Image (tube, rainbow, N blue to C red):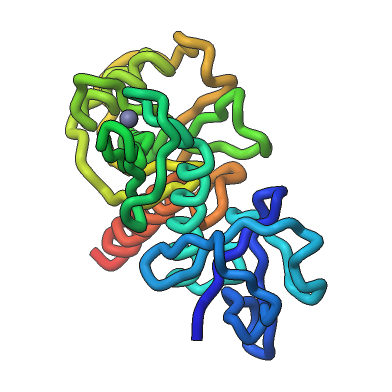
Amino acid sequence: MKTWILFNEKDELLLAKDAEGYRLPTDEDWKAAKTESHHIVADDWVLRISDKEAPAQMARFTLRQSWRVLSDNEYKRAGKAWEILFWGEETIYCSKCGNPLRWNTDISRICPQCGREIWPQLNIAIIVLIQKGHEALLVKAKTFRRNFFGLVAGFVETGESLEECVAREVKEETTLEINNIRYFASQPWPYPLGLMVGFNADYVSGNISFADGELKEASFFRADNLPEIPEGLSMARMLIDDWVAREKQESDDSIKA
Ligand SMILES: [Zn+2]
């Protein structure tokens, strides 16, 4: 049985629903499937279709919303499929000779004229939780759509290491000095084509000042007095949850001792 990863023209993911909940559709769910223009990513069949073609009983979710209803495995596959679909649609001509490109493998396109083969380039971003004693720095960026606090984050520039990027972003956005920058985890971030790399770091010195104007609010918070924070999907939330768990462990240990 084939699994379809279908997006409509509004970039919404189409999902089937059964007694157990939402899932990626199979060819059983979409019998009218025309297969000439699909693309295969890993074992999944990926296609953008017009909303009119999609069966009415299928549910529509943004990729971000789909995280709430899909298994981790299906959400990750949908994310990868979206990255490849998006990239393929944005990458039409050879940047060297201008000829139209065609797919060469699942994840690469090639120019039949000059032979140049290209792969998707990820936008790599760092995000960092800065700890100062029993407090952590939470910030509100001007670009946050919802009214919650997150963490300092930014894109890696050419010629710098991930750790150098962390220190630079913190300095630019807050003017704070930090050290002890430690890798935490990474995650694919298909919005639209990214990799998010999380770090912990320690506060050294300085007062918060919104140097480059990217932030509108920032404060150090205790784990037992947090403001509204992002949902569980994000690396920001994973870093905050990890820190809160460590704080709780430390506080439990001190009560026992
Ligand atoms: Zn070419």
On screen, residue 103 above or below 76: above
Image check: 40 left or right of 198? right
Residue drawn at point x = 25 percent, y = 37 percent: 115
Image check: 232 left or right of 101? right
On screen, residue 101 above or below 211: below
Residue drawn at point x = 69 percent, y = 56 percent: 8
Residue drawn at point x = 67 percent, y = 78 percent: 30
Q: Position of residue 236 (x, y in %)?
A: 44, 45
Depth order, front residue of 94/52: 94
* Residue that protrudes farthest toward the bottom in the picture: 19
Image check: 94 left or right of 182? right
Q: Position of residue 100 (x, y in %)?
A: 44, 35
**Which quadrant of the figure contains the C terminus?**
bottom left
Regarding ligand 1, which quadrant of the image does it lie in? Answer: top left
Depth order, front residue of 185/27: 27
Location of residue 95 (image quadrant) = top left
Residue drawn at point x = 60 percent, y = 23 percent: 142
* Residue that protrudes farthest toward the top in the picture: 211
On screen, residue 145 above or below 241: above
Depth order, front residue of 82/165: 82
Residue 167 visible in the picture: yes
